[in-house]
Image (cartoon, grey):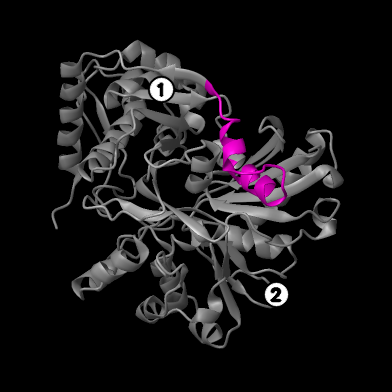
């Protein structure tokens, strides 16, 4: 089918618009960084208006960069940082507060109170999620409690809540649509993944008025039309998925046991578990992988809060490097056995530890330690955290894959990709198109529009660019991992 697909990819640190052709190849892209704010210890916010402005800007730049117009765009797919929470006026669309980002930990004490009251088992059973500040419900509860007038206006039906996808849909359609998809809904602590509906008991528990919530659709569905004046013409929006689920689709992990790991701001390992949700015994998340034609495919996921953000910190915080591209050569100078460990628990530790009070540290420093060693430790930290997740999946009896499909900005670093294979003792496979998050959103949009017949056709488009097989002695591999576990133990806070 002639024409193109536009993916809007709102990540944690930037917004991108990528134009794909109907074979999944990138034609053009545009990107703009988004500022993060840190108003208090463990607090992370973004300006929702900046998110919106960046979205319009990159779309307006990306479409002409591809040499096309709005008329040539068959459909738009949206993928987004999940759990990030926004609250706006139902009539004007005016935001009441900065977006509270998924990394934010301000509701840690509230989660502790709910756990102490015995609510976590029921929450896990209904949502597949743990009771943690990571997810949207406690952030929304905080907004309603702390923004003047928000609680009263919410109870009067005058406000709307959404994750970033819902907010963008609202703005793109001129306030005509308040919708989300099943993957983003499944990250709120308010959505029952078994009934595939907002759960009334959870709404009562978190004191959330139902009128705030968006309508939940399949991942490939009619999400509305863009306002013609925004992009030069009305374009159907027909694909939406949270970023990690979109990456799983972009990586064509359509069969149970297939797994992908995405290395962006954070790192997320997701394994397809098929039509049956599998409850983890090792503090992983059971979530919606995707929902198509009313049929749900589930996934097991491990979430790491800091991966690429550690390299960003080395650049912007410590100013050890000028740009991320320097890290490959520097790490090569240090090697994989330099003995330095960076535990990037800047806002706590994610899976499988779920310790919101842990804080980051660097261990193993000597007089010989330099920038190269610290950079290598930063890159390796993503690999060690990935192994933590795969060890948990193994303990759950679900990790049967011999190959891990990897994507995200970090994996363009060959040193990091090889170090990852060595730490895991597993082949890692890098695809030709590493922008798999945006690609998955484009695939969903194309699936709804009939560009692709089915998932099998999408699967046939996946291509490997390079495989990295482990080349480290097993004893050395285990020694390095023991050192990591020791380092993590040192930053953990006692219960």
Query: What is the x, y in percent for residue 74?
Result: 77, 46
Query: What is the x, y in percent for residue 18?
Result: 68, 38
Query: What is the x, y in percent for residue 280?
Result: 26, 52
Marks 1 and 2, how far apart at CA:
47 Å
Quadrant of image for the C terminus: bottom left
Q: Which residue is mark 2?
A: 92
* Residue at (72% x, 60% y) in the render: 172
On residue 417, which mark appears?
1
Q: Is residue 78 left or right of residue 140?
A: right
Q: Earlier in the sequence, mark 1 or mark 2?
A: 2
The reply to whether the magenta stretch includes residue 441 is yes
* Residue at (63% x, 75% y) in the render: 89
Do callouts 1 and 2 mark residues in contact (Cβ within 8 Å)? no
Query: What is the x, y in percent for residue 295?
Result: 51, 58
Q: Is residue 401 left or right of residue 69?
A: left
* Residue at (39% x, 30% y) in the render: 404
* Residue 321 visible: no
Tag 2's secondary structure?
A: loop
Task: Give whichever of 96, 269 is nearer the camera.
Answer: 269
Chain part drawn in magenta: 440-464
Q: Is residue 391 left or right of residue 324?
A: left
Q: Is residue 123 above or below residue 341?
A: below
């Amino acid at each position: 089918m002639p024409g193109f697909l536009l993916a809007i990819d709102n990540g944690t640190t930037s917004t991108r618009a990528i134009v794909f052709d109907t074979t999944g190849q990138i034609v053009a892209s545009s990107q703009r960084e988004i500022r993060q704010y840190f108003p208090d210890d463990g607090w992370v916010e973004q300006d929702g208006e900046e998110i919106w402005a960046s979205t319009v800007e990159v779309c307006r730049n990306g479409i002409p960069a591809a040499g096309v117009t709005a008329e040539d765009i068959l459909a738009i797919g949206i993928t987004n940082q999940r759990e990030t929470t926004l609250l706006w006026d139902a009539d004007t669309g005016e935001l009441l507060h900065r977006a509270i980002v998924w990394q934010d930990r301000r509701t840690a004490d509230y989660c502790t109170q709910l756990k102490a009251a015995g609510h976590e088992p029921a929450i896990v059973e209904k949502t597949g999620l743990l009771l943690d500040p990571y997810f949207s419900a406690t952030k929304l509860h905080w907004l309603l409690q702390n923004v003047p007038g928000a609680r009263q206006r919410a109870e009067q039906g005058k406000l709307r809540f959404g994750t970033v996808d819902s907010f963008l849909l609202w703005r793109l359609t001129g306030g005509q649509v308040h919708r989300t998809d099943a993957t983003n809904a499944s990250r709120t602590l308010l959505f029952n993944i078994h009934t595939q509906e907002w759960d009334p008991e959870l709404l009562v528990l978190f004191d959330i008025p139902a009128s705030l919530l968006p309508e939940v659709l399949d991942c490939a569905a009619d999400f509305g039309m863009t306002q013609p004046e925004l992009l030069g013409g009305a374009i159907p929006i027909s694909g939406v998925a949270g970023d990690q689920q979109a990456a799983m689709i972009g990586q064509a992990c359509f069969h149970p046991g297939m797994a992908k790991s995405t290395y962006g701001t954070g790192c997320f390992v997701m394994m397809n578990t098929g039509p049956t949700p599998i409850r983890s015994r090792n503090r992983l998340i059971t979530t919606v992988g995707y929902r198509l034609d009313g049929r749900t495919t589930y996934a097991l996921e491990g979430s790491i809060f800091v991966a690429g953000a550690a390299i960003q910190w080395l650049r912007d915080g410590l100013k050890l490097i000028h740009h991320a591209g320097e890290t490959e050569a520097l790490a090569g100078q240090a090697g994989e056995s330099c003995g330095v460990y960076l535990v990037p628990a800047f806002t706590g530790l994610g899976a499988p530890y779920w310790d919101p009070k842990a804080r980051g540290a660097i261990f193993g420093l000597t007089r010989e330690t330099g920038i190269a060693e610290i950079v290598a430790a930063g890159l390796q930290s993503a690999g060690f955290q990935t192994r933590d997740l795969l060890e948990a999946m193994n303990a759950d009896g679900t990790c049967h894959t011999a190959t891990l499909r990897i994507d995200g900005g970090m994996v363009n670093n060959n040193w990091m990709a090889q170090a990852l294979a060595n730490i895991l003792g597993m082949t890692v496979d890098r695809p030709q198109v590493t922008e798999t998050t945006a690609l998955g959103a484009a695939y969903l949009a194309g699936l709804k529009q009939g560009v692709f017949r089915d998932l099998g056709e999408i699967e046939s488009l996946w291509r490997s660019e390079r495989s990295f097989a482990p080349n480290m002695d097993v004893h050395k591999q285990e020694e390095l991992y023991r050192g990591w576990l020791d380092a993590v133990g040192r930053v953990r806070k006692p219960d």
